[in-house]
Image: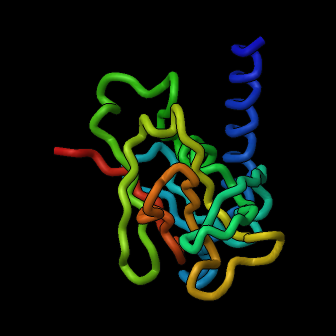
Amino acid sequence: MIQYCRSLNRLLVLICALVVGACATPGSAEDVLLKVDGNVTTALRLSRAEFEALPRTAIAAKDKSGDSHEYEGVDLAVLLEMAGVPLKEAFKGEHAAKYLQAKAADGYIAVFALPEFDHQDFIVADKQDGTPLPDGQGPLQIVAPEDRHQSRWVRELIELRIMTAN
């Protein structure tokens, strides 16, 4: 049953990638909400409409001041799998040198090891408590509830890049 669910999840991710790719039209840089690129099989340039059409998830987390919020968005692992990044069972051998670099509009960068996706939840949120993220946080923000100091809660996220360590 677990193997069936994993296969079904992979099929859903593949269908989403095909739909997003088929609907994507080259636009100006202003039309792109989020880029997923680097050492990926399929680079993504998602508009707001394409991002909002992806499977949604919600996660409860506390902000820096300790207030609880519900963040809604897209599972970060789903975005990476759409771009062909090997995660979980597919993460083997040569892929061990790969990592995720998340970049904000102001140039801030945070790094994630790909094996973290085996045991930790991360989302690319566009809503907090049912409303769009406030200015200075959005339109997109990585939410990592288990990160104690929230230094990887990248605000104003614009790019996810897969890099390979030398």
Q: Quadrant of residue 139?
A: bottom right
Q: Position of residue 27 (x, y in %)?
A: 62, 78
Q: Is residue 158 visible?
A: no
Foreground: 112 or 105? 112
| Furthest-right residue in this view | 130
Q: Quadrant of residue 53?
A: bottom right
Which residue is depicted at the point 47% across and 63% down? 150
| Furthest-left residue in this view | 166
Which residue is depicted at the point 54% across and 77% down? 156
Q: Position of residue 163 (x, y in %)?
A: 32, 51
Q: In this rendering, is residue 53 above or below 122?
A: below
Describe residue 71's horizontal placement relative to residue 46 as left or right: right
Number of marks in the image? 0
| Furthest-front residue in this view | 66
Q: Is residue 155 visible?
A: yes
| Rendering colour mode | rainbow
Q: The N terminus appears in which quarter of the rendering?
A: top right
Which residue is depicted at the point 37% across and 62% down? 110
Q: The C terminus appears in which quarter of the rendering?
A: top left
Q: Position of residue 124 (x, y in %)?
A: 61, 60
Q: In this rendering, is residue 73 above or below 166?
A: below
Which residue is depicted at the point 67% across and 47% down? 17
Q: Position of residue 55 (x, y in %)?
A: 77, 50
